[in-house]
Amino acid sequence: MNDATYLNNQFIIAMPSLADPIFSHTVTFLCQHNKEGALGIVINKPVDMKLGEIFAQMNISVKSLIAAEAPVYSGGPVQQERGFVLHTPGGNWNASMIVSEDIALTTSRDVLEAIAIGEGPKNYLVALGYAGWGQGQLEKEMIENAWLTTPFGRKVLFDTPISQRWTAAAGQIGIDINKLTTSAGHG
């Protein structure tokens, strides 16, 4: 594969037939995809926790009640004890990876401290863990019709209600994912 065929800065949407309980009906934002594998953050599986609880666990003082009430997501099954912040660019954080001109992924405490006092990125999503694929694994799953790819959509990531992100992400390319059959693409 060349760089143009990698899926960086795109959504992968679980097809209706994907029965894996971790990924069923999920939308994952791919932060990194190359010949070694892929790393993504699931953006529509909230955990039973608010961001304020993470601030308390990390002894971060909170001034922003909006931030304290923000949902926390299950970003995937890998390193679930570690926080990952998808956010709009800006700021000079200790451990950031620029995914595109629209999105960065930060894993350092400083971004959470800024969010807690209302001085962090304008838009953000905090997840525990990430989704990872080894070399060739995601490509194999794509061939098996486990995933639908769509372009990244800022509105889907930050403005769409969580329960609607799966259908909204597919809707960006005119697909009603609820009408796809489990045998789609196997004709």
Image (cartoon, rainbow, N blue to C red):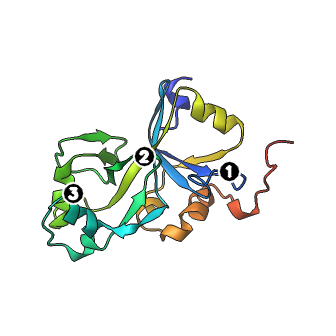
Residue 114, given in percent of the width and then of the height, sits at: 16, 59
Q: Amino acid at mark 3?
A: Leu
Compute the Cα span from label 3 to label 1: 33 Å
Residue 170: which quarter of the image? Answer: bottom right
**Residue linked to disc 2:** 130
Q: How many marks?
A: 3
Q: Which corner quadrant holds the C terminus?
A: top right
- Asked whether the beta carbons under mark 2 and mark 1 sit within 8 Å of each other, the answer is no
> What SS does tag 3 mark?
helix
Residue 79, given in percent of the width and then of the height, sits at: 38, 44
> What SS does tag 2 mark?
strand
Query: Above or below — where is 31 with respect to 13?
Result: above
State whether residue 139 appears in this view.
yes
**Residue linked to disc 1:** 18
Judging depth in this view, the residue of 178 and 24 nearest the camera is 24
Query: Above or below — where is 144 with respect to 80?
Result: above
Circle on res. 174: none
Mark found first going from the N terminus, 2 or 1: 1
**Residue linked to disc 3:** 112
The residue drawn where x is 20% and y is 53% is 111
Density class for disc 3 (Cα within 10 Å; few <14, some 14-19, many ≥20) is: many
